[in-house]
Image: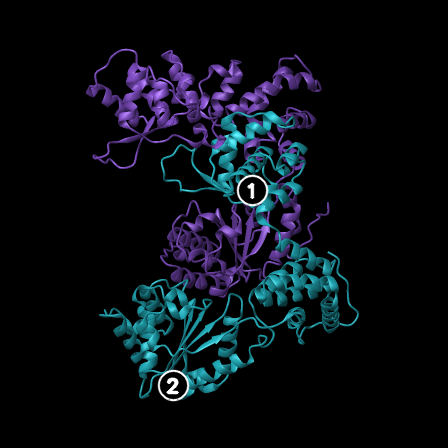
Chain colours: A cyan, B purple
Amino acid sequence: MSKRRTKETSLTLGECISQVQDILRKRFCLQKLNGRPFGMESQHKHLLELLKRTAIQGESNSILIVGPRGAGKTMLLNDVLNALLEVKQVRENVLEVHLNGLLQTDDKIALKEITRQLQLENVVGDKVFGSFAENLAFLLEALKKGNRSSSRPVIFILDEFDLFAHHKNQTLLYNLFDISQSAQTPVAVIGLTCRLDVLQLLEKRVKSRFSHRQIHLLNSFNFQQYLKIFEEQLTLPEDFPDRRFSQEWNQNCQSLSKDQTVKDVLKKQFNSSKDLRSLHILLMLALSQVTVSNPFITSVALLEAYRVRSMDSKANLLHGLSVLEICLVIAMKHLNDIYEGEPFNFEMVHNEFQKFIQRKAQAIHNFEKPVIMKAFEHLQQLELIKPVDGPATRIQKEYQLTKLLLDSNQIMDGLQKYPHCPTDLRQWASSSLG
Amino acid sequence: MMTSLEHPGYPQDGLLRLEEKLLCRESQVSLLLSLFGEPHQYSYPSIFIYGHTTTGKTYVMQTVLAELELPHAFVSCVECFTSRMLFEHILNKLQSYVTSSEISQSLYISCDSFSDFVRLFKQLISHQDLKNQTFYIVLDKAEQLREMEANLLPGFLRLQEMTDANVTVIFLTEIVWEKLHPNMGCFEPLILYFPDYSKVELQKILSHDHPSEYSAEFYAAYINILLGVFYTVCRDLKELKHLAAINFAKFCEPVTKDEATESDTRKLWKNIEPHLKTAMQTVYLREISSSQWEKLQQEDREAGQLKGLSAYAHVELPYYSKFLLIAGYLASYNPARTDRRFFVKHHGKIKKTKFLKKHEKTNNHLLGPKPFPLDRLLAIFYSIVDSRIAPTANIFSQISSLVALQLLTLVGHDDQLDGPKYKCAVSLDFIRAVARTVSFDLIRYLYDFL
């Protein structure tokens, strides 16, 4: 590894690169931003005020944050919670309970988790409760400690909120919203979900107890703002130890965002999906190419990263099939063309293949039927073809109806890239007769 | 020897060993290591690697993690097919990395739900012994996660976020990502593709482990011949390796018997080529086992004498059962309206229009057998059997034994009102063999061969 000593500061190039990788990786992987998330000022204010009212003034609230995947719901919430905890009174008083629909798949598990996060396991001990509501009420009562007349405010955060709506009777949701309406303990219930129709999932009694407040986070920035975000994501923070290197790096980022190839790549990415997570994947792939020998992100690296991202996965699989399997795929394509997409079985494919062999091929000689059956089953294993009925029906496997899960265009593209493709095969594929 | 892989944070000798062990996969290893970064740096929370079978996904992953001594847990989703097994396997593997001195702590951890898994995982991973290194969880055959509980795949995709720890989950599978990702959306992983080996690369890998008694060029020539026969049919490295191993003795035979020298390629080729062709029909299809094949080669018998697996499917049936089976086949593959022409002795004139050359799709041998009622079977049976037979229980019991042998299949429910319906489940070759034994000209009675 070559190490170059810089003239002024004490960090070597290797260490600089290492630091850069550390910081940027944390930013892309852990979603630790260097500032406010973009374009969410009003939502931020709204949520912060709501939570302040719960924490300081003891008012119960419920709210849903709705937005597509990767829109920044969790980021917004974490930002607001950090801002909230800066107030001393809040820090000492307020309790947080984080629940996730993927983890707590059942209301019983959810209740155990709530008990654990409120650190009330000792208090509950071995008590047996009649119902969920009793249990929850007991927990919240227990939070009234000492001679305080009022209970400590609790913030419930429910990630993947729509999954909680699939629990039996929606008991957890019902009870949480019930408590938020009945003013015993100041409680804030914040739900995060990606479904826009989440309210339709709630039962009538649950919906009526919900305050119907929603914050929508739709990625509402345009391409110019997207470019700015791109540059921001790559910029190193002010407190980077080696000033000269960070200046060079930031200048490189600025020149990247003006480069036309980079702009084209970003435009394509923006057109396919706007959210920041896809941008992070792209940047991660480009960042991984940064080493001591090429210490800056180049436009070539971004281009390559986009190419890796936008590969057609089924075309890649086609590339790796054997010649016999490709013949079968082309035979299936012809059957689809002739019979307009009706499902076929192995015997029909075999028949097409035999017609091709007898008519045209010199390059491919005939194989025995069991060998062709093995190739057919390999295609089934790769899920490029799929039986229509399912494996349970009692039909001989040669006669089971299957359909092809590849598009005609995909097949033709795949054939173009296929290594050492015999010309007979290509001609057969592009001929319109059977 | 300078390695072409430049990755800070990993020991140089480890990288050199990787280069030696993993042939033809340098760019993939390089990409993986550059994504991993240094051992303490964070990597992308989930990576999805797909590619054909035996393109080295599992092998590369295991070798990289073992040689560079990175803390990891390797799980096969076929082996751990319930969520409990999956969680416990990962947690106990993690525990084995953190328990250094306290022996009492190495009790088996049991874990039931994803919630407990995340909690226990968080506790274990904050241990000092790991020194902030990234912990890798590798889920092999990840397509099995679709069959397990629905929250496992989305949960593992965002495990880094949920446990707030330095962990990366890697998924290895043959199936493309579009088929695995859940309907409600999820945390999208970084998708990587392991390309298949080209013919040149296959040649290189297969020639790598040549036996020491012979020279590398000799073995390379053998591999070349083998690939020439099998490459159009199969590109699976495992199968090709197996075929190379069991056929090599036959290839060397002329040399060991001093009939030819190592460089006499034409003679060697003439010797081995028919042998490889029979191998394609037998060992490749697993009709006979590899040990039978090797015995065959040593005794130098004809392969045709050996009975493959499908030969055992032929069953000796009693005389009337054979006719019942033939009748069943005719009932399945002839349309009912043509019965009169074939089976009635004096059918008179039948209009030609009913027998126009059929559109190819309605060739019944392509569509499969059709169900027929019991009465039709018996009618055809009586017509094709020469002697007079009474419909005794004997005949009916032979029908049920044919069903038990799965030569006929019962279709639909056992409905007493309509009578049972059957379908014939044998192939044309089989029934021709049966018909030959009773000197029955089957082709004359089949509608498709008119």
Q: Are marks 2 and 1 on the same chain?
A: no
Pointer 1: what residue?
Answer: B52
Residue B274 location (% of width, % of height): 59, 18
Chain ID for label 2?
A
Residue B220 placement: quadrant: top right
Residue at position x 59%, y 75% from top?
A38
Residue A120 seen in the figure: no
Of residues A301 and B216, the one drawn nearer to the viewer in this rendering: A301
From the image, which quarter does the C terminus of chain A lie in?
Answer: top right
Residue A4 seen in the figure: yes
Dot 2: element: loop
Residue B95 placement: quadrant: bottom left
Residue A232 location (% of width, % of height): 66, 72
Dot 1: element: loop
Of residues B238 and B427, the one drawn nearer to the viewer in this rendering: B427
Pointer 2: what residue?
Answer: A59
From the image, which quarter does the N terminus of chain A lie in?
Answer: bottom right
Kind of residue indicated by mark 2: Glu
Q: Give residue B337's mark.
A: none
Residue A362 location (% of width, % of height): 65, 26
Q: CA distance from mark 2 to mark 1?
A: 58 Å
